[in-house]
């Protein structure tokens, strides 16, 4: 794979580059977030490994800028910031995985392989478009259109809506959303899900005067055509 390593610790960068090269990957090392962003705009990478604390542009801002530019390559944060809030911030910014320092190189390799397999499986399994009533989701260019109007969705909002459109009429639990959208396999005890559902509803329902996402008390949420106020 073509791997981008964004790390400003020179000795650690050399260590990771050596290990990944020995594993058969091609690695490009960048020590500055701003320069790394410019490189990503003109070159293709299969995966990126990104530190949080970088000169030029910090890791969170770098990843947010990539996602805003519709660059969807898998991203692993590799950082010494290991608190729950730090992990949530990283995944919320658009990261696909989060590994804290110090780390075992074998675990980094395993996570790279897992992300690569998942990315390949999703690209093979996904149709180009999901349709539900007057709502259309293009999975290639990440656009959502309802009644001919483009919805200005953030990356996480798009992933939430994609999950709903893949399972219309089915209850989607908070745990399912955390796992699918944020890759969190524990309850971080934050309101991140509720906040994003509320934002998505404002964009998806308010301009059109109806309701699609319904709260199922004590269970989760459901995508279903109904009339009435948001619950």
Image: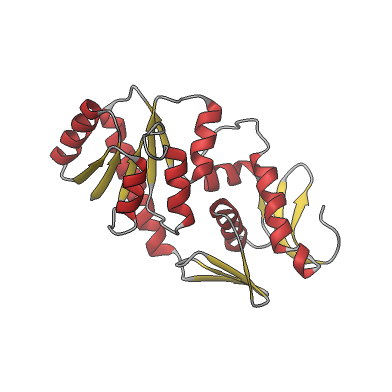
Left or right: residue 40 compared with residue 215:
left
Q: Nearer the viewer, residue 60 or 47?
A: 60
**Front residue (pair 101, 189):** 101
Asked whether 39 or 75 is in front, the reply is 39
- Residue 217's quadrant in the figure? top right
**x, y percentage for residue 91?**
50, 40
Q: Residue at x 61, y 41 (%)?
A: 175
Residue that extends furthest to the bottom in the rendered view of this protein? 148
Q: Position of residue 137 (x, y in %)?
A: 56, 68
What residue lies at 50% left-to-right and 32% top-to-bottom?
87
Q: Is residue 209 visible?
A: yes
Q: Is residue 229 left or right of residue 104?
A: right
Observer able to see residue 95: no
| Residue at the image point whose x is 83% and y is 66% from the top | 227
List the single residue furthest toward the top.
102
Up the image or down, 127 lies above or below 215; here it is below
x and y, in percent, of residue 194 in the image:
70, 44
Along the line of sight, the residue nearer the viewer: 40 or 195: 40
- In the rendered image, which quarter is residue 159 located in? bottom right
Q: Position of residue 178 (x, y in %)?
A: 58, 42
Colour scheme of the picture: secondary structure
Q: Residue furthest right?
A: 228
């Amino acid at each position: 794979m073509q791997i981008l390593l964004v790390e400003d610790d020179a000795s650690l960068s050399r260590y990771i580059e050596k290990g990944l090269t020995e594993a058969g990957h091609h690695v490009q090392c960048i020590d500055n977030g701003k320069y790394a962003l410019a490189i990503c705009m003109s070159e293709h990478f299969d995966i990126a490994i990104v530190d949080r604390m970088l000169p030029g542009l910090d890791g969170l801002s770098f990843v947010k800028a990539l996602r805003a530019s519709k660059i969807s390559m898998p991203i692993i944060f590799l950082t010494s910031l290991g608190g729950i809030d730090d992990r949530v911030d990283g995944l919320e910014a658009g990261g696909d995985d989060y590994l804290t320092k110090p780390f075992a190189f074998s675990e980094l390799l395993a996570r790279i392989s897992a992300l690569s397999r998942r990315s390949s499986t999703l690209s093979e399994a996904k149709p180009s478009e999901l349709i539900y009533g007057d709502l259309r989701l293009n999975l290639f260019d990440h656009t959502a259109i309802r009644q001919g109007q483009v919805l200005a969705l953030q990356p996480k909002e798009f992933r939430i809506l994609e999950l709903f459109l893949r399972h219309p009429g089915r209850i989607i639990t908070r745990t399912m959303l955390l796992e699918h959208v944020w890759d969190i396999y524990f309850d971080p005890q934050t309101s991140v899900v509720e906040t994003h559902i509320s934002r998505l509803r404002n964009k998806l329902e308010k301009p059109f005067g109806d309701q699609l996402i319904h709260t199922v008390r004590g269970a989760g949420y459901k995508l279903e055509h109904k009339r009435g106020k948001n619950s």
